[in-house]
Amino acid sequence: MNRHSARTTLVVGGARSGKSAFAQQLCEASPYNLVYVATSPVFADDGEMSARIQKHKDDRGPRWRAVEEEIDITKVIKDNDHADSALLIDCATLWLNNLLYHQLPLTDHINGFLQALETSQAHIVIVSNEVGQGIVPSAPEVRAFRDHQGRLNQHLASTCERVVEVRCGLPILLKPIQQPHICL
């Protein structure tokens, strides 16, 4: 995407941290064909979520082609496996939620996703929420989701060439790790 580019990038951050906007800007700074992969299901009775989705659509320009896929991200990556393509997957958290909601085998889907990331020629940016820095949830199902999300983020961070955390709209490079010069 620039001289510090990576083929795969994970962008993590908290809610409203600016991670999606940063990921979009990263893709738009590239010369590649842009593909926006939307993982959010559309709920007819959720006006607030519908408005969020519409805002995301309005914020993207004509360079973007949208693909809506709630479950089979691996297929989307394979279908767009071109060196001149940049895929923005927004977001891994909603995708994981969809897998859990439909009671699909997490290991199979996650492993397929990771393998597709490793083998694709496309440039891929994944947005994901950091959900483990708050208090321990009181409900067991919420704790389970937080644990699944934390493990997914670890797998994605391990697989991706670059990891950026966004806080208050500011990107912080986490990977590749820059070795600090530390002395005693």
Image (cartoon, helix red, strand yellow):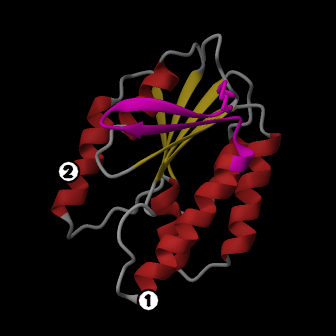
Residue at point 45%, 61% (across, down) = 94
Q: Earlier in the sequence, mark 2 or mark 1?
A: 2
**Per the image, is 179 magenta?**
yes
Q: Residue at position x 25%, y 67% from top?
A: 44
Say which mark, if any, is on residue 140: 1
Q: Residue furthest left?
A: 47
Q: Which of marks 2 and 1 is in front?
A: 1
Amino acid type for the residue under numbered disc 2: Ala
41 in relation to 88, above or below: below
As drawn, is 50 to the left or to the right of 151? left
* Quadrant in which the C terminus appears: top right
SS type, badge 2 = helix
Q: How crowded is mark 2: few (under 14 residues within 10 Å), some or many (20 or more)?
A: few
Asked if disc 2 and disc 1 are in contact, CB closer than 8 Å, the reply is: no
What residue range appears in magenta?
A: 158-184
Is residue 66 shown to the viewer in this render?
A: yes
The residue positioned 58% from the left and 13% from the top of the image is 31
Which residue is nearer to you in this view: 114 or 18? 18
